[in-house]
Amino acid sequence: MKIESRAVSGVTILDIHGKVTLGEGSAAIRGKVAELLNEGNKNILLNLGDVSYVDSSGIGELVSSFTTVSNQGGQLKLLNLTKKLEELLAITKLLTVFDSYDDEQKAVESFS
């Protein structure tokens, strides 16, 4: 798994590539989110369009990151959910917890 970070209009976008699974994948997201919060970046958008697979611990990590960011007064939103990930979030009722977007511009604008 690889994470690339970029800033757009005060929102930090994390482009995530590969698999979000137990171990390395979920730990990488946790570390990156913690690093952003420590730097004062509280508006975080996870671009999951290039994520090929998410296991249960990956879902848990998304929830954990969402909670951590929210507890620090920030917002974490999702961008470009794959069909499979969207179905998984719907089944687990987490689709109602996360704000998710298909359009990056609309997602960035939603933070203001």
Image (cartoon, rainbow, N blue to C red):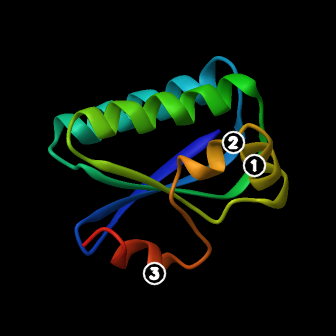
Query: What residue do we see at 61% from left, 26% from top?
Result: 60
Q: Say what secondary structure mark 3 lies in.
A: helix
Near-viewer residue (4 or 75):
75
Distance between the Cα atoms at labels 1 and 2? Answer: 5 Å
Which quarter of the figure is the C terminus placed in? bottom left
Q: Earlier in the sequence, mark 3 or mark 1?
A: 1
> Does the CB distance between marks 2 and 3 fall below 8 Å?
no
Q: Earlier in the sequence, mark 2 or mark 3?
A: 2
Q: Height in image: 76 above or below 80?
A: above
Which quarter of the figure is the N terminus placed in? top right
Query: Which numbered dot is residue 99?
Result: none
Image coords of residue 30 (percent x, y)? 45, 28
Distance between the Cα atoms at labels 2 and 3? Answer: 23 Å
Q: Counting other residues with Cα less than 10 Å from the Cα at mark 1, is it few (<14), some (14-19), or many (20 or more)?
A: few
> How many marks on residues?
3
Query: What residue do we see at 16% from left, 41% from top?
Result: 39
Near-viewer residue (64 or 19):
64
Query: Which numbered dot is residue 106?
Result: 3
Asked where in the image residue 71 lies, by quadrant, the reply is top left
> Does the CB distance between marks 3 and 1 fall below 8 Å?
no
Residue for badge 1: 90
Query: What residue do we see at 74% from left, 25% from top?
Result: 56
Residue for badge 2: 93
Asked where in the image residue 102 lies, by quadrant, the reply is bottom right
For the residue marked with disc 1, what is the amino acid?
Ala
For the residue marked with disc 3, what is the amino acid?
Lys
Query: What residue do we see at 38% from left, 73% from top?
Result: 108
For the residue marked with disc 2, what is the amino acid?
Lys
Q: Say what secondary structure mark 2 lies in.
A: loop
